[in-house]
Image (tube, rainbow, N blue to C red):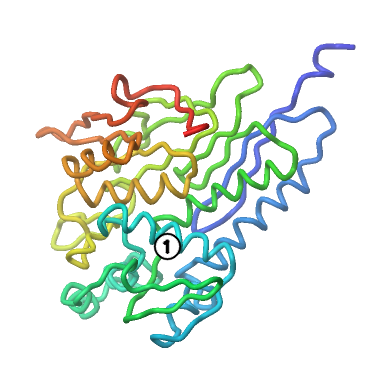
């Protein structure tokens, strides 16, 4: 039998989701039919988007947002899972990660509508309680104890990546690389026995270039930065990451923060939380929580400098990342 007949084929799948695209890379035996896998992957991210989107007025999240204060609302299991995790990380981060910033996100033009000056003033003047103090969960039901607009953009893509990985496992595929936009999750190893390599992007709004390389095995990675999604106000670019204390975009923050964790939802949310906290407070909390994080900071000339926290980044920004067993 020839060597070619036994080689595993490289299968690259992708499709639309959440205003961007999902991807999956795997290697399969000859004769493998990718059609059913592609359909299952698309259905999984469609479910996440259908439950958690703020761009779809009929999503389960928007239905919860529209519900009266104090009324228990039944929510589907996957949305409930993300709400629980979002509240957990909100508490652990001291409110730096807050899923209750939907009014500010919309007002500043990071939702379906353009920025609205009246909405901006209202969002900045609002008296805020963190979502983990407002949202109550009892079994499969959720209620709001006070007015709040929920937004899961800081965690939903990461959760979608986790669902992609789960689908591959359910299809009997133990090795692969899945992602949505810049959030990625590695499963097992490549066919050559090496870890999956992923670039950490340099914080450059004009072009896409790598700053460093991660080798991932059974781990997820997410990056939050100030250089991809922004609005311009009075000639100044403002990041899409909201400061819960102000109801407005962050004024000063690291250029980007990359977090490696067991799940992509966790990495996604913690990357946002550390951006809000900033380099010093964020690094302190990352050390306390045992997080693996790479902070990219700009010097006076605008060049990116890497500051690493955790076992993966304390020595070199490029490292083998394995979250198994942690």
Count of marks placed on residues? 1
Quadrant (top left/top right/bottom left/bottom right) for the N terminus: top right
Q: Is residue 26 above or below residue 223?
A: above
Residue 6 horizontal side relative to residue 152, left or right: right
Q: Looking at the picture, tell me which residue is in the foreground, 148 or 183.
A: 148
- In the rendered view, would you say 205 is above or below 141? above
- Residue 173 is situated, as x and y percent measured from the top left of the image, at 71, 36
Q: Is residue 21 left or right of residue 275?
A: right
Residue at the extreme right of the image, as rendered: 1
Q: Is residue 114 left or right of residue 71?
A: left
Q: Which residue is most to the front?
A: 138
Seen at 45% across and 61% down, the residue is 84
> Is residue 140 shown above or below 66?
above
Viewer-side residue, 149 vs 114? 149
Please tell me which residue is depicted at 51% across the width and 80% down the height of the picture.
Answer: 73
Residue 83, by quadrant, is bottom left
Considering the numbered disc 1 on the image, is that residue within a helix, a strand or a loop? loop
- Give whichever of 112, 160 is nearer the camera: 160
Mark 1: give few (<14), some (14-19) or many (20+) Cα within 10 Å.
Answer: many
Residue 185 spot, x, y in % from top left:
52, 39
Answer with left or right where residue 153 lies relative to residue 279: right
Q: Position of residue 145 (x, y in %)?
A: 35, 80
Residue 207 in which image quadrant: top left
Q: Residue furthest left?
A: 300
Of the pair 130 and 234, the residue shown nearer to us: 130
Residue lying at 51% horizontally and 59% vertically, measured from the top left: 18
Residue pictured at 28% horizontal, 41% vertical: 256
Judging by the rendered image, the residue that carries numbered circle 1 is: 152
Image coordinates of residue 323 in percent, x first then y, are 48, 32
């Amino acid at each position: 039998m020839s060597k070619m007949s036994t080689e595993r084929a490289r299968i690259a799948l992708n499709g639309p989701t959440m205003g961007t695209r999902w991807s999956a890379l795997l290697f399969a035996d000859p004769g493998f039919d990718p059609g059913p896998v592609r359909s299952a992957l698309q259905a999984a991210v469609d479910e996440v988007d259908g439950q958690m989107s703020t761009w779809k007025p009929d999503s389960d999240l928007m239905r919860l947002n529209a519900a009266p204060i104090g009324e228990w609302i039944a929510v589907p299991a996957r949305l409930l899972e993300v709400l629980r995790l979002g509240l957990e990380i909100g508490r652990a981060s001291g409110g730096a990660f807050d899923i209750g910033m939907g009014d500010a996100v919309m007002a500043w033009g990071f939702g379906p509508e353009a920025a609205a000056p009246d909405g901006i003033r209202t969002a900045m003047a609002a008296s805020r309680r963190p979502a983990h103090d407002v949202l109550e969960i009892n079994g499969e039901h959720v209620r709001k104890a006070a007015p709040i607009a929920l937004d899961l953009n800081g965690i939903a893509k990461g959760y979608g990546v986790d669902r992609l990985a789960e689908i591959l496992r359910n299809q009997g595929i133990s090795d692969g690389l899945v992602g949505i936009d810049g959030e990625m999750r590695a499963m097992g190893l490549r066919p050559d026995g090496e870890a999956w390599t992923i670039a950490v992007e340099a914080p450059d709004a004009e072009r896409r270039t790598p700053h460093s390389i991660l080798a991932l095995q059974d781990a997820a990675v997410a990056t939050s930065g100030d250089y991809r999604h922004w609005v311009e106000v009075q000639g100044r670019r403002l990041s899409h990451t909201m400061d819960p204390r102000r109801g407005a975009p962050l004024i000063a923050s690291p250029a980007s923060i990359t977090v490696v964790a067991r799940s992509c939802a966790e990495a996604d949310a913690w990357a946002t939380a550390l951006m809000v906290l900033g380099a010093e407070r964020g690094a302190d909390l990352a050390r306390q929580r045992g997080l693996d994080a790479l902070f990219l900071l700009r010097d006076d000339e605008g060049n990116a400098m890497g500051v690493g926290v955790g076992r993966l980044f304390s020595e070199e920004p490029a490292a083998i990342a394995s979250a198994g067993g942690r």
